Image: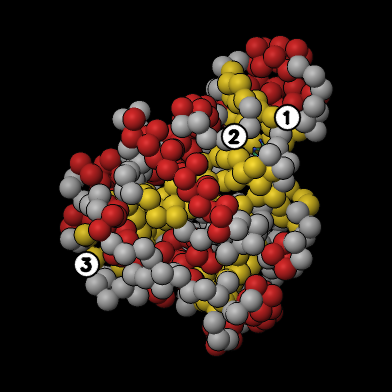
Amino acid sequence: MNILVVGSGGREHALAWKLAQSPRSDRVWVAPGNAGTQQDAENVDLAVDDFDHIVQFAKQNSVGLTVVGPEAPLAGGLIDALDEAGIPAFGPSKDAAQLEASKVFCKQILRRADVPTAEHRAFQDADSAVFYLQQQEDRPWVVKADGLAAGKGVIVCENQEQAIDAVQRIARDKAFGEAGDSLVIEERLFGQEASILAITDGRTLVTLPAAQDHKPALDGDTGPNTGGMGAYSPTPLITPAAQAKVEEEILVPTVHAMKRSRQPFQGVLYAGLMVTNQGIKVLEYNVRFGDPECQPLMMRLDSDLLDIFEATVKGDLASIDSPTWDPRPSVCVVMASEGYPGDYTKGHPIRGLGEAAQLPDVKVFHAGTREVDGEIVSSGGRVLGVTAVADTVAGAKLQAYRAVKCIRWKGAWCRKDISDKAIHP
Ligand code: AMP
Ligand code: GLY
């Protein structure tokens, strides 16, 4: 089967790498891809928002399965466009993708599904939001722009004053553009975060092992927020009993609520969770694989990913065996450009990739890389996801950082403590 993966990050490299291993896969293309996907698959120069050409390419090249990685084309309706053209596509429809694209919609579904989440209120304008905050006692809040804001539309506040300031930035100054036309104000939760992803065809659900991301830029979870500086799986934070509870009390009711509201969900349902003293609560849903969570998960998946995706698209997930996983933990360390998550430099030649690839149980997934005149150069903020497996989390961490040490370019940096929360909980 010919397969098309849409996207260009570390997530898409991991998906293409895994799909290419299927004995049933013929050609695997990545649109537009990066220097790493060009090695494990083939790049095709199509932008993720160029729906017409993506559909045309899939038709002309007898693509039997399209997998859409990032949230923006999902929220924009790429799956609907592929469906209309009769091309099997993995991922939620535009309607179902609202679960990530609208925080107000997400909260409505959580409420309908009776899933534990932070207490919240939704507002359409700054004045009523500020009025609400003034009526409440002074306490920590979280203010969220309703729409997609490249992971930046959430402002975590210590007190009322900061929350009012956040409302002004989102709803009055439109710091995140239209995404701030509506906003959600919610109680701030405290605890450790974990990500639990499930694949669902809208009826049957397959929960993947839990992972933990590291969103803040600097060691010890300090510094500005990023797309994610590293991840590992499984995490001891989620016991097998907790995992079962998340499936039963969070994921399954959500899939049912989506079906009842006539927005059946097909694809990856990613629950961003907070493990609090009052139990596990949902912070947000994403409608796709997490990046970088996808990289350690794909590193551990033993089953054929193509079988799983195909069964999902056919609505036939119940008919296949549960996926099997390498019991060994994996750790992914993101190497980033100087300046990231702010303005960053790019175009620097990357050295040592060959050396890193020689190390056993290591895979270097590319994100912001490109090939220029036969040389691989940095081209994004998050550049590589250096991933390793070993018998223990500590061993996987050591091996990942061994590979990191082989790789260099001007200004390259990474967090040094990825997975430490599993090692010294
Ligand atoms: P989101 O885009 O909703 O995932 O939020 C991004 C990050 O904001 C999360 O990973 C959390 O670190 C933080 N966050 C979101 N909602 C809350 C909340 N209610 N309490 C504390 N932190 C939150
Ligand atoms: N790793 C966080 C995300 O993909 O949104």
- Residue 312 is at least partly visible in this image: yes
Indicate the position of residue 158 as horizontal and vertical percent values. 80, 33
State the image coordinates of residue 336 (x, y, percent, origin top left): 65, 63
Which residue corresponds to mark 3? 1
Residue 117, labelled with which disc?
Answer: 2
- Disc 1 target residue: 141
The answer to whether residue 216 is above or below residue 137 is: below
From the image, state whether disc 3 or disc 1 is nearer to you.
Answer: 1
Amino acid carrying label 2: it is Thr
Mark 2 element type: loop
Residue 386 spot, x, y in % from top left: 59, 72
Location of ligand 1 given as a quarter of the image = top right
**Could you tell me which secondary element the residue under label 3 belongs to?**
loop
Distance from the alpha carbon under mark 2 to that under mark 3: 41 Å
Residue shown at the point (35%, 75%) measured from the top left: 21
Q: Is residue 17 visible?
A: no
In the foreground, 368 or 214: 214
Lower position in the chain sequence, tag 1 or tag 2: 2
